[in-house]
Image (cartoon, grey):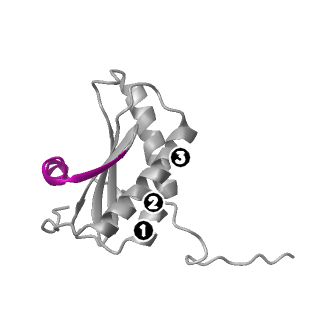
Amino acid sequence: MQHTAIKTVEDKPNFSYSRAEKLKSKKLFEIMFTEGKSVANFPLRVIYVKTDFKDNVAIKAGVTVSKRNFKSAVKRNRIKRILREAYRLNKSIVLNNSTDKYALLILYLGKEMPESHAIHQKMEVLLEKFVKKISQEPIKSIPKEVS
C-alpha cells in the first residue's frame, strides 16, 4: 500500500479562471472604454480600471476580439479561448505583485490568426508591463461595482 502526500491548497498554485473572475458587467465595460487606462504589447492590449468588487475577487478579466478584423465567429471564439488560456496561466504575475483590485479587458488587435505559444509569450510580457505601470502611477478608483 502506497501513501501519497496530500497536497493542501497552499502547495498548489491557483491556475483556475472561475466564473467570479470573469468580467461580465456591461456598466463596467462602458466605464473601461471611457475612463480606463491601457498598456499594449502588440497584438495585445489591456484596458484597466481600479475598482472594488462585491464578491472580493482581486482581478476580474474579460477578453474581446474585433468583429471588424475577424468576420467568422468561429475564428473570434478560437482567439478568445487562446487569450483566456494565456491569461489563466499568467495571471499570477498580477496577483502576486498587486494589492489593489482591478478590472481588466484584454483585446486582440492583430489581423491574422495567432499561434498559441506566441500569444502566451505576449501575454506574459503584457502582464509584466501592466504590473510595472500600476506600481508607478496612482489610479483613481471607481465606485464599487454592481455585480
Residue 22 location in percent, x, y?
33, 55
Q: Nearer the viewer, mark 2 or mark 3?
A: 3
**Kind of residue at badge 1:** Leu
Please say if the residues under marks 2 and 3 sit with CB atoms less than 8 Å apart.
no
Q: Earlier in the sequence, mark 2 or mark 3?
A: 2
Q: For the N terminus, which image quadrant?
A: bottom right
Q: Which mark is residue 65?
A: none
Q: CA distance from mark 2 to mark 3?
A: 13 Å
Q: Which residue is mark 1?
A: 95
Question: Mark 1 near mark 2, Cβ–Cβ under 8 Å?
Answer: yes
Task: Give the extent of the magenta segment.
Answer: 24-40
Residue 2 position within the rendered picture, expressed as x and y whole percent measured from the top left:
84, 75
What element does badge 2 sit on? loop
Quadrant the C terminus occupies: bottom left
Q: Which residue is mark 3?
A: 121
Q: Amino acid at mark 2?
A: Lys
Q: Is residue 65 above or below residue 137?
A: above
Say which label, 1 or 3, has the lower sequence index: 1
Q: Compared to 47, does 118 lie above or below? A: above
